[in-house]
Each structure stands twice: as C-alpha cells, then as structure tokens.
Amino acid sequence: MASPVPEHRLSDSTTEATAATSLARWRIHVTGVVQGIGFRPFVYRTARKHGLTGWVRNASDGVTLEVQGSRNQLMPFWEEFLHHRPAGVVYETLEKTELPPLAPEEPTFQILPSREGGVRQPTIPPDLATCAECLAELRDPADRRYQYPFINCTHCGPRWSIIEGVPYDRPLTSMKIFPMCGECESEYHNPADRRFHAQPVACPACGPHVELRSASGELLAERETAIRLAAQTIREGQVLGLKGLGGFQLICDAGNEAAVQTLRQRKRRPDKPFALMMTEEMLRQVCEEPSEAVWRWLRSPTAPIVLLRRRHNLTDHTGKPATGNAPLTSSDERRNQATTSPAEDFRPENGVCPVAEAVAPGNPYLGVMLPYTPLHHLLMEAVGRPIVCTSGNLTEEPMAIANDEAFQRLGKIADVFLVHNRPIVRPVDDSVMAEGEPDDIFLIRRARGFAPRPIRLAAKGPVVLATGGHLKNVVGLALEDQAILSAHVGDLDNLLAWEAHRRAVEDLLRFFQAVPEVVACDLHPDYASTRVAEEFACRLKAPLFRWQHHVVHFAACLAEWETPRSDPAFDGVLAPQPGPLEIEQRTTRPLPVPLLGVIWDGTGYGIDGTVWGGEFFLFDGRSFQRVAHLRPFPLPGGEVVVRQPRRSLLGLLAACGMAERELDSPDGLLRNLFTETEARILLHSVARGIQCPQTSSMGRLFDAVAALLGLGARISFEGQAAMALQFSAEQVYFSSAGPLSSGTRGPNPRAAGEVPGDAFMPSVHRFALTKGRPIVLDWQPVLKSLVAGLRAGVPRERLALDFHRQLVEAVLTVAEQFNVQGLMFSGGCFQNQLLRRLLAAACRVRGVTPWFARRIPPGDGGLALGQIWLTRRALQGDFIPGRGGVAENVNKDSNEKD
C-alpha cells in the first residue's frame, strides 16, 4: 500500500502565524481514478459541510477544485479530503496551491461544467460491479427501481464500456440517447443523493430496457417477462445469448451435461474450460473454500473470474464423479455420455453439485465469478443454479457487442437472446485471475474492472503506440508517465480478429486524442499486429521499433515492479481495510542488478531464425544478454505441433536418437501415437530438415512430456497438454492435504517428497548444463529418466511432479552461475500455479528474491507494456538496444519525421 503523502510535497504555504479566522483560497488539482466514481459530489458535500465557497469541475486529465474559507474551515475539509474519500477513488498525483482570496460572498459551492482542452490524460474508471446499496434497492419492492436491470449509481455500473470521450459526462456516453425523467433528473442534481452526477443514472421510466428475441431477432417478450422467460429457457437446457456489460455472453445451465455439450458443439470449443457464474452459497458447495484474499477479489468492484479448485468429492447431477482429474477424453466421448435431464435446483442440503464435467473437462479448477450487473443478479435468482457464462463468439473470433451483429454471428449458437437497447461503445471481456501462493494472486487476462486503469511509468516521455503480440493481444499507449492498456482483444487468427485489433488501436488514439511519436511492435514480421504497426508508422512518419518477444516479456515485468503501485486496484483490493491517502510514488523501486529474467512460453521469433521460448536473460540496467536457453529440438510440421503435442515428443526423441527404438519395439512409446507410415514420414522430414524448425520453447517441452505421460497427444487449444501435466503433478502435490489456515490447500510434505517448511528438494534427475555462454539446458537426461520411470511403473503423477521440480532446480542452478540476488519470471508458462509455488519456495530457501508478473498477465497480454518500456528507455538513452536479442529501430532512416 502506498504511504500517506508527506505534507512537504504539497505546495502549501500555510504558516502557524496566520490567524485562524483569516480567509484563504486553495486550488487543488488531482489525477487518478477521480472521474465517474462520485468524486465531485463528495467534494461538493464536504465543502458545503464545512461552509466553504468555490467550485469543482472535471478536467481533461483529472479534477480541479477551488475552495475558500477560514483556516478553521479549510483544515478539517483538507483532513476529510485526504482520508475519507469514497471507495474506489484513487489519488495518483495531487497539487495544492494557495491563491489570493476573493472578496467575501454568499456561501456557495458549485459543480461547474467540465472543461476540455490540454493533454488528455484522465484516469477513466473501469466498469464496476453493482454496489450493495443498488442491490438492496433492486430487491426492495417499495423502491422505484425494484428489479430494474440497469440500476446504478456513482459507485457502480458501466463506465469504460459506454464512454465515448472525456470529460466523462452523459453527453459523451452511450446514455445520451436516454433523456432523464423528472425523478432521475432530481437525483442527478441533488448533492445529498447517491446518484448526484451519476452519468448512467436511469430508471424504468426513462432508461434502457431488456427484450427477449428469437435467434433471428424476432421480439418475444419485454422487461420482467423477458427475464423470466430467459431463465426458463436456461432451465430447459437451451442456450441463451445475453447482452451483458461489455459484450454478448453465451449462457446455459452449468449442471446440464447435454446443454453444455450443445454449447461446445455450436461454439466449436470442444475442450477449453467455460467460465461459471454463481452465488457465494453455490461457490462454497462447488469449490474449495477460497482464501481471504481471493474472496476480496471475488466481491470487489472488479469482480473477476478467479480459478478455484473443485471440491474433490463432488458428483455431478448424474451421480458421476466430477473431480476434474481424469485424462483428456474426446468431446465425442463426453457427448455420448451426456444426459438430457436438467440439473436439480441448487440446495446445499441435497448434496448435489450442479456442475457438469463438460464445463471444464479433465480440469480440477473452475473459473468462477459472482454476478456483477443487476441483470446478472436477476437472471441468477430466476435460474436458481450455477450457469455457464462464456464470451459471445465463435472460437477465435472477437466478442459481439451489437444486437444485429449478435443475431448474425451467434444466431446458430443461441436459441434465444436477452438483449437491451443501451449501446456498448467498445468490447470489454471478463478479467481472469488465479492464485499461486496465498499472497500471489495474478492476472491471466486484464479486461473488465481493470482496463483502462493506467500503469504508472517511472518517467515522462514521448507518446508511444504499442501493438502487442499475436496471441491474447492487448494494445498499449504511453502518455506522459502512464501506460494505458486496452482490454483484452484476443488471438489475431482471422479477419474479424484483425479488424478488432485495428479498432482497438484507433479507439485508444481517438479517445485520448493522441498522435504517436513512436510505434513499437513484435519482431515477428508476419504478425497482424506487426503489420498494423508498420502501417501506422508509415502513416505518421514515426520511427518503428521492433522488439524481440521474450525480451519484451522481461521488460513488462520490469515495468510492473519498478513502480510498485503501478495498478492501484491491486493495493485497494488486497488491503484488509481501506487505507489512508495513496499517492503514486514518483521514484522508482530500486531493483537489484544484475537481474536474471526467466522467460518461458510457447513461441516467439528469435533473432537467430529459430523459435525461442525457454530463455534466460541477464539485465544489468542498460542491456539484455541471452545467457542461457533450452537445448533446441525440431518441431515436425512447424506450427501444427501446437495442436499435436505428440509431434513435439517425436522431435525430442529423434533429436536424442531414441525415436527408432520407441517406434520399432513392441512396447515403444510412439506406437500408440502414430501409424508407422505417419511416423516414418515425420522422421524423414526431421532427418532432412523439411518443415522442421528448431525451437528452444519450454511450452513445447511441456507438451512433449504431457504426450509422453499419456496426458494429451492431440489437443484443441494451446496450453491444454501443459495444463494436464500441471494437474497431474498437483494430484501428488496436494494429495491428502488439508486446507491451510488461509483457506488455500497446501502440499502434503510426505506425498510431495518434501520436508516440513521446505516446499522444494532437489530432484534425482536433472537438466545437464553446458559450459560456456550461453549456457544450454540439455533436456536429454530428463527425457531419458522419464522414459525409464514409465517403464519401471512409476505413476505418471509422480513423474509429472518430478518434471516440475527438475525445472525449478535448473532455474536455481543457472542463477548460481551469475551471482544474482533477484529472479524475474514471465511468459505464458508462469500461468502454471504449481510452477509458481515451487519456484517461490525454492527461492526463499536459497535466499533469492523472486518477482512474478502479477498486475500484468505473464502471457502475451503484457507484451504492449513491455514494448512501451523498452521504447521509452531506448529513446531516453539509458538503455542500449541491439544486444541479447533486442532489435532496434530498423526503419529509422525511412520513418524519421520530416
């Protein structure tokens, strides 16, 4: 938590000699999360309470106010202003200057119209979950907003999804098409009301309303009837398309196996887990008790999806086990086993877990969120059981946000649609979080509830546009000392996704009226994000910086940790009680150098022409050096290996001379994975180097080991096999373990091969490290020991855990070669909660400080921030690009400004 702002940092010239009754006038300018969250009404009420005159108004970059009164009036106002601001308000910078008093006048304080102009650098609040006060009104039959699905106030409701421009006022939101009725207008202008200057304020008489429409768009019902019938369709096993806060969602009964399978088939998503929405009571029955920190996140205004472990002894509504620990099975097998009977109503006393195995097949975790809009609350109460709540799109396409678009794109997925007439300005998907250790809660997807909160940078600099990567794309914009990241865009695998990426870029530039002076992108020449960057750099005649993918991952983690409170939402949620004034520190956190960055993921364009992904970089404060990497191995067929881990395994076996034996012998490990003809063709291509790029990817090594252990030879989404390997290892790690005091399950020391108080012990089989630089981590001893273990009958769960521990030992052994005091971990592999736990424990034992990506996703959703950080540092001259896998401004000559 940030420290209280020291008084000497404020330009306050008050002296003790000044008479307490003399008039003084202060101008205060504050930036941070101060617009659209009830801040001006708070200032108004506080100033009136203390008898002050003056005004408050929104500005392009925050809020400005002037207050005048005696010292006896101003000082208590100042105390309340600092320490009793509304929940959700975050002060990032604060300036207070004294002005000459104006002539005495009638006591009055005003909220003035917003002022435009200047640098557009406001901290726009994200969309916020429904507050307790609005929920109470929603359920009160005597309230005029009883069961109104768009109830909101200054403390909650839509923000980023409806804002068209700044300052944040109703005419610049999609609510401008709904003129307020007399009662809403009265609340809006009443300083004592919770809806004073609440821009989305509305009621049944004047605001948006819901409609139930057929898959083709035909009107079926309106308002309360529409919600009731929508709930009925869910209970009957149908799929509902719901227009939510930031886009469409697809919903079905989470306990109805047939309904979930139908949704999977229509959405073309055979295995990837679906998110769930449920009440707190349901959550306690379905999942292991979350830690206190996780509960705070679930109940917070951000209301993210959080990955929680299923209860291990649950059954689905058919009475079959729902442990989530089974090997991967095909979607066809699961569909054949499905029943068409609906789930029982949720009642804690009936002992039924109303969550079908098909929700997250083979997965011990469930992605769970609580209802976060009034419409979700009303629907959940009418359905009475957990629901699947997944993004409204076909797999690999962007989320639909407009009604007509949904009917066209989702009409063959949803049976009916529950829509409304409040336009969504930009798509905002749900955020996703997970927990490694109890104090290590991290983002996997940064979207609703977080975007567009800025990430504080260490210094001001030129405007930089960063186009991010190809997968899990996020766009970034650097303004002054802030990095503003878009919500999650997604994978750029098709034309619709490319267009969504371009819109996200144009939206940020338009909204903040920014003209980039520099453009940054990934080094890969064929990424859609790279081509957009090239186009904008050419159009703007701006320099274009291309940065190596894995160095960017490291830089994103550096950017996060050198400004310790870079995302105030984390401190605000994780603090047990609301803290005093939190001002963003203007000095950077001293990070020890040299730092070793451990960057592991599935793929990234390497400067040597190979596919990188198992990298170690040494950062000395001025440059990056690639000091170690995984031994490269061939990928038969190139990119197709992402969906066929068996090919990664074949590449490994071929590279160490084991493939022929495992194909020819009766007990060969490849015999059940390939036909002989198929295997011979692939081995021939490996021998000739045809369509077999070399890779040092840790993600592909995870895939290969998963295939070796029978956990997924073919998969339907990237990372599926690596997840299965993690889950298998966790069966041993968590076996027979009871909940810790925090509510988080801990390892059984005996089962995990650990001693009490030490979550790490060296594995028997280790990676071999070559001498010289860069160090090469040879995986051959590990692979051979795993093969030997399988043949010796060692349980695969034990081998899976051993593999994780061998990785941890390798990291610590490499770190010892460079005498570093700190390790940074980023890249998609560090979404693995078990790997994070083991590494953190091992670092503690060895006396090394670990830093994990937390506020920014460790995966490719953090790349835009890393691109910004590298570009700013290069332009400021305190960083040497061009070394250790970093590409400098390759278009400098052609793109320099005229």
Image (tube, rainbow, N blue to C red):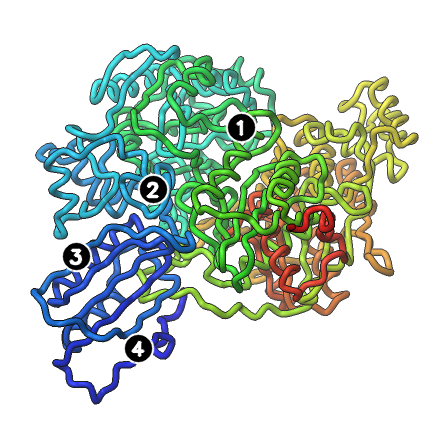
- The disc labelled 4 sits on which kind of residue? Asp
Disc 2/disc 1 C-alpha distance (Å): 35 Å
Cα–Cα span, label 3 and label 2: 24 Å
**As shown in the figure, which amino acid type bears the numbered disc 3?**
Gln
Q: Earlier in the sequence, mark 4 or mark 2?
A: 4
Distance from disc 1 to disc 3, alpha carbons, whole Å, reads 58 Å
Q: Nearer the viewer, mark 3 or mark 2?
A: 3
Please rate how many residues cluster around mark 1, counting C-alpha atoms within 10 Å: few if below 14, some from 14 to 19, many from 20.
many
Q: Foreground residue, 375 or 363?
A: 375
Lateral position of residue 619 relative to residue 367, left or right: right
Q: Which mark is residue 361?
A: 1
Query: Given contact means CB atoms under 8 Å apart, are the residues at marks 1 and 3 in contact?
Result: no
4 or 1: tag closer to the N-terminus:
4
* Pointer 4 residue: 12
What residue is at 83 percent from the left and 32 percent from the top?
692
- Measured along the vertical axis of the image, is residue 628 above or below residue 685? below
Marks 2 & 1, CB-CB < 8 Å contact: no
Between 196 and 833, the one lying in front of the other is 196
- In the picture, the disc for residue 159 is 2
Q: Looking at numbered disc 1 in the image, what kind of residue is underneath it?
A: Pro
Mark 3 neighbour class, 10 Å CA radius: few under 14, some 14 to 19, many 20 or more? some
**Under tag 1, what secondary structure?**
loop
Q: Which residue is mark 3?
A: 110
Nearest to the eye among marks 3 and 4: give it. Answer: 3
